[in-house]
Amino acid sequence: MQWLLQEFEDTQKLAEALERLGVGYTWHKVVPFVGDLIPAPDIRGPDDVVLFGAYTLWRYAKAHDLRPGVFKLTPFVDEAAWHPFLLNGAASMFLTLRDVPGHLAEMNRDYFMRPVDDGKEQPGRVRSAEEIVALAKKALALNEAEIPLGSLRHDTLLMFSEPVRILKEWRIWAVDGQIVTWSQYKEGSRVVYRHTIDDDALAFAQRMVDINPDYSPAYVLDICRTDDGLKLLETNCLNAAGFYAADLQKLVQAIESLGAR
């Protein structure tokens, strides 16, 4: 597998894992707004290339027909198999950014807000309605031609849900239908990065993968423990998700095996 990396703190960690395993990689910068890579990679074969860095790398992978390239996902809220297990989804409200001021301006409450697509325009978190409306107005004041790639746009579809008390949160990496590594990243409101997971949470994550086998060859699930049990928070693009305390050597080996088939 040919590994193309955009330099971030997390991809530095990935590079260290690749070096320990004797797997080659190259560093590249992304030209803003254009999406080209500098230096341009010398692609040995388009069917054996993977890219890690910003989510927008999917455009380069698509333009150059690189596979697996970037494992771009469909919105997790559209996956019927997961609906009974979602923390936020079935009871959520969905609005485009341009509709936010008209619907939320008079609200005096908090929402968990995140983009439906996995574009990373805004991280999912709890915000007040006032904060959300101010954010929307700021973006709507821009001409759409002025908005950079990867930012909230007038037609970005957002999901709004009732905030829920979360006891623990984990990030899980699934490759070829199997959980290959994991990391806890929150305990209550406290950020903690530990390479640990409760046995029932690991079994729950594997069940989520098993009941939706055609979702993607490789992706990240975020799951959590609540007062009502284990829930699926969201999925994320594996190529652009933070690694926290995951075992990156296991992740590299799984992706290498996926590419070797």
Image (cartoon, rainbow, N blue to C red):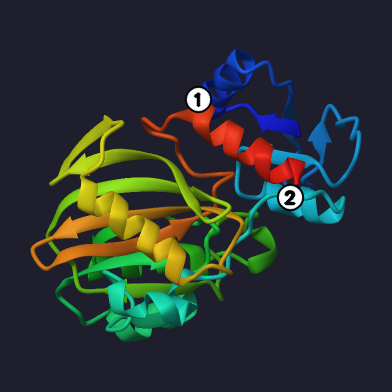
Taking the view exactly as shown, the residue that stands out farthest to the left is 227
Q: Nearer the viewer, residue 121 or 259?
A: 259
With respect to residue 107, does 112 lie above or below?
Answer: above
Where in the figure is residue 112, as x and y percent of width and height?
A: 27, 66
Q: Crowdedness of circle 1 by 10 Å Cα count: few (<14), some, many (20+)?
A: few
Q: Crowdedness of circle 2 by 10 Å Cα count: few (<14), some, many (20+)?
A: many
- Give the secondary structure at mark 1: helix
Horizontal arrangement in the rendering, residue 71 relative to residue 106 (left or right): right
Residue 104 found in image quarter: bottom left
Where in the figure is residue 229, as x and y percent of width and height?
A: 15, 64
Instruction: Tell me the amino acid under the disc marked 2.
Output: Pro
**Labelled pair 2, 1 in contact (Cβ < 8 Å):** no
With respect to residue 102, does 225 lie above or below?
Answer: above
Residue positioned 70% across, 21% down in the render: 23
Number of disc labels: 2
- Lower position in the chain sequence, tag 2 or tag 1: 1
Instruction: Tell me the amino acid under the disc marked 1.
Output: Glu
Q: State which mark lies toward you, 2 or 1.
A: 2
Horizontal arrangement in the rendering, residue 21 relative to residue 211 (left or right): right
Name the residue carrying label 2: 68
Give the CA distance from mark 2 to mark 1.
Answer: 23 Å
Name the residue carrying label 1: 9
Where in the figure is residue 22, as x and y percent of width and height?
A: 68, 16
Where in the figure is residue 249, as x and y percent of width and height?
A: 52, 26
- Give the secondary structure at mark 2: strand
**Of the numbered discs in the image, which one, if any, rests on residue 73?**
none
**Any part of residue 131 in sight:** no
Please state, as top left, top right, bottom left or bottom right, where the N terminus lies in the image: top right
